[in-house]
Image (tube, grey):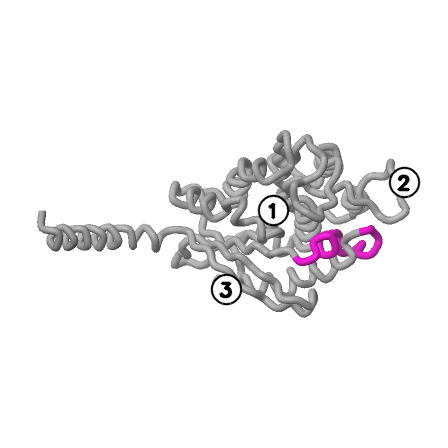
Amino acid sequence: MNPRLLHCVYSVSMLLLMLCCLPACKKGVKQQDDELYSRHLQRKVKLTVISTPMPDDKTDINLLVCNDGQLFDRLNIRFMADSLYRTKRLSPLVIVGIHAGNRLEEYGIAERSGKAAAGGKADHYDSFFNNELYPYAKKNAGVRKFKSVAVAGFGAGGLSALDMAWSHPDKISKAGIFSGAFSRKEKNTPDTARGMMFEKLKSSRKRPHLQYWFYAGAGGNTDIAKDDAEDISSSTLQIVELLEDKSFTTAGDIVFRKGLTNDSRSWIAVFPEFLEYSFGK
């Protein structure tokens, strides 16, 4: 075939292929980076925003706020959401991944900031979520209210996610905790003491109606640098049993998945199940 004709045929073929792919691209899940200055944290907060195609009826849009957004690429969160959406197993969803700053200081229990060796700015982080990040997410999605809101996190980020859900049940209905740092204790407490979150839930008089999705591997620490999650399996089990014993939940409100390790490979394997549990059709 004439080289010029061959080039022409190739060019037309590529153009047709691109035109055929355009509708599929428009229907796919998108990812973009953004930045939000926080007066509560006194820093610029990097965000990764993943969104399914938005429906005409914006009352159907859901929100997932996820700590440790810097892990999104490693965990293939966009690919997971896209696969679930294309197979019609995921409702319209916006996922906002908050890239961590000083995670040992910002991830913790807000009302007990300063009482532990870490988490001294957990109250600032809670204010950032409530007063800055949540309004940003609504404005970005163009909604006055999301159909449902979940929070999630890994290690110390999981501890923070549960704390935020417990403190803001008016906004949040579900929490996903992956290898949560529930072993964190207050200063000068004996080694035999339970973790701060256990003690907070045990003494709480509130009964927020929440749903919980837990993952815990048998190993001790996570593979996140500067994390303080220890005894993950046993401390997570203590939290789950406490929630059940104190009748904080009803049947089906708690999912507890156990694994061998507390690392990215394990989280990748179970995160799609959490997405479908929280926002599935």
Residue on which disc 2 sits? 190
How many numbered marks are there? 3
Q: Nearer the viewer, residue 190 or 87?
A: 190
Instruction: Identify the mark at residue 140; answer none if there is no mark.
Output: 3
Tell me if label 2 and label 3 are in contact, CB under 8 Å: no
Question: Where residue 165 sits in the image (x, y, percent)?
Answer: 66, 51
Instruction: Identify the mark at residue 101; answer none if there is no mark.
Output: none
* Residue drawn at 82 percent across, 56 percent down: 114
Instruction: Identify the mark at residue 174; answer none if there is no mark.
Output: 1
First in sequence, mark 2 or 3: give its number.
3
First in sequence, mark 1 or 2: give its number.
1
First in sequence, mark 1 or 3: give its number.
3
Q: Secondary structure at mark 3?
A: helix
Please state which amino acid type lies under the numbered disc 3.
Asn
Q: Does 148 appear in magenta?
A: no
* Residue drawn at 73 percent across, 38 percent down: 239
Note whether 24 is above or below 254 in the view shown.
below
Q: Which residues are magenta?
A: 101-117
Nearer mark to the viewer, of 2 and 3: 2
Question: Where residue 32 sits in the image (x, y, percent)?
Answer: 47, 59
- Taking the image as shown, residue 138 lies to the left or right of residue 53, namely right
